[in-house]
Image (cartoon, rainbow, N blue to C red):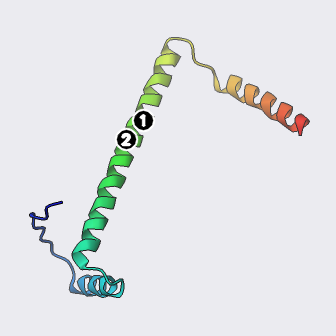
Amino acid sequence: MSKQAVFTMKLEPELRDQFMAEADAAHRPASQVVRELMREFVQRQRQAREYDAFLQRKVDAARTSMRAGSGRTNDAIEAKFAERRTKASSQA
């Protein structure tokens, strides 16, 4: 992967010194550590957006189901799972 872009940032001198010391203690160049942190951040952000989109699709589907009259009430769901718990505990 070509490393042609330059990223400049301002930070507190103490943080820079601590970071450089930790990178040195890990026997790794600071630039490599920063690249890894950036990649991890990008991945976490993408995963968070994908999960949010997944949840939104689930909520939209549930709302559509409720509007169409095919949803169930909370009481009906609670009763169904109470029945399942009773059945599971009697089989144990």
Q: Nearer the viewer, residue 8 or 73?
A: 8
Q: CA distance from mark 2 to mark 1?
A: 6 Å
Q: Quadrant of residue 19?
A: bottom left
Q: Position of residue 14 (x, y in %)?
A: 26, 87
Packing grade of label 1 (10 A; few <14, some 14-19, many >=20) is few
Q: Say the numbered circle drawn on residue 20.
A: none
Q: Is residue 89 left or right of residue 16?
A: right
Q: Position of residue 64 (x, y in %)?
A: 46, 18
Is residue 83 placed above or below 67 in the rendered structure?
below
Question: What is the quadrant of the N terminus in the image?
Answer: bottom left
Packing grade of label 2 (10 A; few <14, some 14-19, many >=20) is few
Is residue 75 placed above or below 22 in the rendered structure?
above
Is residue 33 placed above or below 49 in the rendered structure?
below
Q: Secondary structure at mark 2?
A: helix
Q: Residue at x 44, y 36 (%)?
A: 55
Q: Amino acid at mark 1?
A: Phe
Q: Amino acid at mark 2?
A: Glu
Q: Residue at x 42, y 35 (%)?
A: 54
Q: Position of residue 69 (x, y in %)?
A: 55, 11
Question: What is the quadrant of the C terminus in the image?
Answer: top right
Q: Secondary structure at mark 1?
A: helix
The residue carrying mark 1 is 54
Is residue 20 placed above or below 54 in the rendered structure?
below
Q: Residue at x 35, y 87 (%)?
A: 25
- Residue that protrudes farthest toward the top in the picture: 68
Q: Position of residue 39 (x, y in %)?
A: 29, 60
Q: Nearer the viewer, residue 76 or 37?
A: 37
Q: Nearer the viewer, residue 52 or 29?
A: 29
Q: Nearer the viewer, residue 86 or 88?
A: 88
Q: Residue at x 26, y 70 (%)?
A: 34
Q: Is residue 80 left or right of residue 30?
A: right
The residue carrying mark 2 is 50
